[in-house]
Image: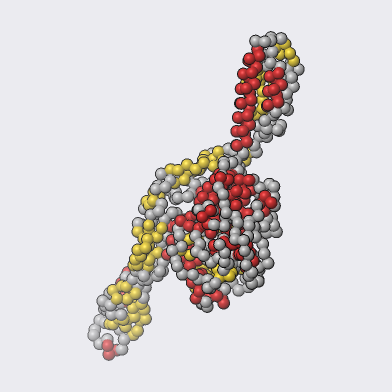
Amino acid sequence: MEPVSDPRIYSNRYQVTHLIARGGMAMVYRAQDLLLNRAVALKILYPELSADPTFVERFRREAQAAANLSHPNIVPVFDWGQDGGTYFIVMELVDGTSLAEIVRGSRTLTPARSAQITAQVAAALGYAHRSGVVHRDVKPGNILITTDGQVKVTDFGIAQAVASEDHLAEAGSVMGTATYFSPEQAEGAAVDGRSDVYSLGVVLYELLVGRPPFIGDSPVAVSSQHVHGTVPSPSDFSDSIPAELEAIVMLALAKSPDQRYQTADELRDDLVRFTDGQPVHAATRDGAYYGADVTRAVATVTPGERTQAVPVMTGPRTDVRRRRRGAGGIVIAIVIIVLLAAGGYAYARLAKTSSFTTMPNVVGQSVATASSRLLADNLVIGTTKLVFSKKTSGTVVSTNPTSGASVKKGDTVTLQVSQGPAPALVTVPDETGKALSTALSALQQLGLVVHVNQTSTAPAGGVPNTVLAQTPIGGTTSHVGARVVLTVLSQGATFPLPDVRGQTPLQAAATLGQNGLSVSSTTTTSCSNTVTQGSVLRTVPAAGQLVASGASIELVTSSGVCQVVVSNVIGQTTAAASTTLSAEGLNLGQVTDALPTDCLTPGTSGQIISQNPGPGISAPYDSSVDVTVCP
C-alpha cells in the first residue's frame, strides 16, 4: 500500500489513508471510519465513470448485491454512498493478499492446498447462487487469502440478480475478465451459477499448472478459445497432479453448462471428497471438453487481465486438508489378510513336523515377504502390532523370538510392523468465538481432523456459524491427524438478537446477515431526539430478544428530532424559564429588554412579558425560545 497525498474525507466519515489497488472500475483505498474508529476498505468509482449513469448503476448494484450476501467466505459490505458526485462502497478491510499475488510468476500450489482454497470459494459462490446472485467475474484477483488462511471472495461489481432482465454492458459486448470467461459468457448468452463454476475451474487449473488453460495475444483471442478450443489436460504440464483432482477440473471446465457440476456446492463436495481421500464423482462422469471445429477470425484488442467489456464470441463450480488415514487402513488390511492366510497354512503344516529350526531374520522385509519366509519354516504368526517407526510403512520392525534364536516348528512368532513415522506434535489453537470457516481453516492447516457438533442451546453472545466450544481446549498439545470437536449452533436454534441501533440500514443488514438473519421488507420510521435521521432507531423484535437463524427483522429508522409543544413561560424570570424549557428539551434563546412603556404594571420587573415561539406552538427538539423581559 502507498500513502495518499490528499487524505480526503468522504461523507464526513471515511478518511482515505493508503492506496491498495486499481481495478477495472474503481480505486480501492485503505480508509479510517472516523465514526466507529476502525479501518475499512473504500472502493471509489473512477471520476470519469461517475458521470456515466450505466456505470453508476452497475456500481450501485455491486453495493446492493454484496450487502445482502453474508457468508464467512464473502467480503462484507458495510456502507455505500456518494460525495460530491463521487460514488463509493465501504467494505471490510481484509488483512492478507490476493490469490493473484500468490500465484504470480507461474507459481503453483500443492494439490491439497489448491483444493482447499477452491472449496472455500465454491462455498461462497454456492451461497451467492442460492441468494440469486451470479458473480460473473471469478478470478484470482477477486479471491483474497487472510493471514490466518481464510478465503474471501470480493468484487461483485458485475453481479446482478438472476431474475433481472436488463443488461448493463454495451450491446455486442460482455463484461468480465477474458482469461476466466465461461463459453456461454463469451458468447453473450444468459449465464447462471454454472458459469461461475467454469470460471472457478479455470482458477483451480491455474493453481495446479501455473497458467490458465487458454492464453492469447488479446482478450478476444482468449475468449474465442473458451468457445472453440480444447482444454489441455493438467497432467500434460505436471505428473504430480492426482487423477481425481484432474477429473474435477475437467468436469468444471466442460463446454456445455449441462455437462458441468450443476451447482457450486456440488463442486465443493467433490473437492472435499478428494481431500478426504474418498472417490470423487467427477471420475465417473464424462465432460464435454471440445468446442466447435471452426475458429473464427476476431479483431485484435489490447490484452489484459482486468475486468472489461469484450466483444461477444459466436459458437455452438472450508478449509480442507488431504487426510493420510487411507494409506494406514490399506496397510492394516494387507497385514490382516496376509497373516490370516499364513497362519492357516502354517497350522496345516504342524502335523507334518515337530523338529527345531533357527528363527530367520525378517526385520526390514515387507509383511508379505516375511510371512512367506516364516511360513516356509513352519512357524505360526501370532500377535501383530502396528508401531510408529522410521522404517517404511508395512515392513517388519522387530520379531519375538528374535532372529537367530532356536525355535520349534509350529511356534508362534510376534511381529511389530511399521506404520510410518510418528505424526508431528502440534498445539491446538483456541478457536472459540471465531467464525466456523476461520476455525476450520486454522485447524485443518495444522493437519487436525475437525468434527462439527451442533447444539440447540446458545450461551450468552452465541450466534450462528461461530464456534461456541471446542474439545480439546486451546493450548492442548496433540498430534497431526488428531480429532478436534467444534460446537456450533444448530439450524433453528435461538440466540439473542444483535443490537444494531445507531447503524445505517445497510450496516444493520450486513450485521444481521452475518448472524444468519434477514431484513424485513416492512420499514417504519419514528422521531428520535438521540438517533441521527435515517439511522436505525430500534428493531422488531427488540435487541436481545431470542430469534432463530433465518428470521426476518424489521428495522425502525429515525425520521429526525421530535416536535415539542412550547410551554408558557410568560411571567417567569429568565432562570425559571430556562429550567422549564430545559425539562422539555428546549433552550432559552435570545433575551431582549422590553420598552419602558411595556412594563408600567407594578411587579413586572425581571419578568418575561412575551416569547417566540408562543405558548402551545410545536417546535423542534433542542431548538431555542426567545423571550422579552422587563428591565
Q: Residue 320, percent across and down?
A: 57, 46
Q: Is residue 572 above or below residue 556?
A: below
Q: In the image shown, does 238 or 159 lie closer to the viewer? A: 238
The quarter of the image holding the N terminus is bottom right
Q: Residue 71, percent across and down?
A: 49, 55
Q: In the image shown, does 614 or 128 lie closer to the viewer? A: 128
Q: Taking the image as drawn, is residue 82 in sight?
A: yes
Q: In the image shown, does 546 or 184 lie closer to the viewer? A: 184
Q: Taking the image as drawn, is residue 43 in sight?
A: no
Q: Is residue 420 above or below residue 406?
A: below
Q: Residue furthest bottom?
A: 597
Q: Residue 322, percent across and down?
A: 60, 43
Tell me the residue at 40%/70% (across/down): 533
Residue 222 placement, left or right of 121: right
Tell me the residue at 68%/23% (across/down): 371
Q: Residue 594, percent across and down?
A: 31, 86
Tell me the residue at 64%/72% (across/down): 299
The quarter of the image holding the C terminus is bottom left
Residue 340: quarter of image: top right
Tell me the residue at 65%/60% (across/down): 214
Q: Residue furthest right?
A: 404
Number of numbered callouts drawn:
0
Q: In the image shown, does 304 or 284 lie closer to the viewer? A: 284
Q: Residue furthest left?
A: 601
Looking at the image, what colour scheme do you see?
secondary structure
Residue 620 placement, left or right of 470: left
